[in-house]
Amino acid sequence: MNTLLKSALLLALLTGAAHAVEYNTLRPEQSRMTFVYKQMNVPLEGSFKRFNGQIIFDPAKPTLAKAMIEIDLASIDAGSDEANDEVAGKLWFNTKQFPSARFVSTSIKSLGNNRFEVAGKMSIKGRTHDASTPATFHPEGANGVFEGSFVLKRADYGLGEGMWADFGTVANEVQIKFRLVASSAAGKK
């Protein structure tokens, strides 16, 4: 009986290893990058239409995971053409000089129950700061889905200078929300 139990356990371990999936292709067309900020204490929402990057994630080996996300800042949708033009200008993103924002992971730590803490470097407008965010992961068909949110302080990156520097007009805290979909090499179409 002991030999039978050991054989069954070994078979279960081998079967699990055979089904391990590494998600390694970001699917921007299925993903979302949004934000919420307060202007005059009124919550407003926006999004970025174009971003890309790379995710390498094996749920069985989360500490080996890596992520790099690059956001095309000119693809912002802040709610109106006027707002989009304003935030693309020098006082906000200055997209002519700094066309993209970038996050590069430095570590990914499992928190249990498909929850992770992702730490890395966020670079916006020529400034780089440490950043971390909690994220959840779940398989969805042939894809893996990473979801989370974190608060970015716009003053850390020089976003909203001059007349926009007053946090009473536009709050310093901006909540960034993401839903990133990645597929495995085997799941690519």
Image (cartoon, rainbow, N blue to C red):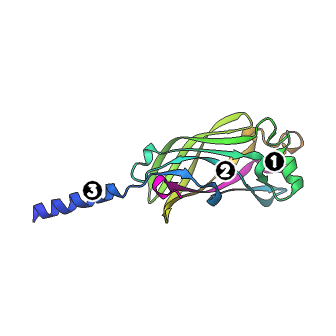
Of callouts 2 and 1, the N-terminal one: 2
Q: Amino acid at mark 3?
A: Leu
Kindly report the distance in space between the C-alpha atoms of the residues bearing marks 2 and 1: 15 Å
Q: Amino acid at mark 2?
A: Val
Q: Residue 20 or 170: which is nearer the viewer?
A: 20
Residue 178: in sight, yes or no?
Answer: yes
- Callout 3 environment at 10 Å: few (<14), some (14 to 19), or many (20+)? few
Res 148 quadrant in image: bottom right
Res 149 quadrant in image: bottom right
Of callouts 3 and 2, the N-terminal one: 3
Q: Is residue 43 above or below residue 173?
A: below
| Residue contact at pointers 3 and 1, CB within 8 angstroms | no
- Callout 1 environment at 10 Å: few (<14), some (14 to 19), or many (20+)? some
Q: Which residues are magenta?
A: 169-189
Query: Residue 14 bears which disc, if any?
Result: 3
Residue to which mark 1 is pinned: 167
Q: Position of residue 24 (x, y in %)?
A: 50, 49
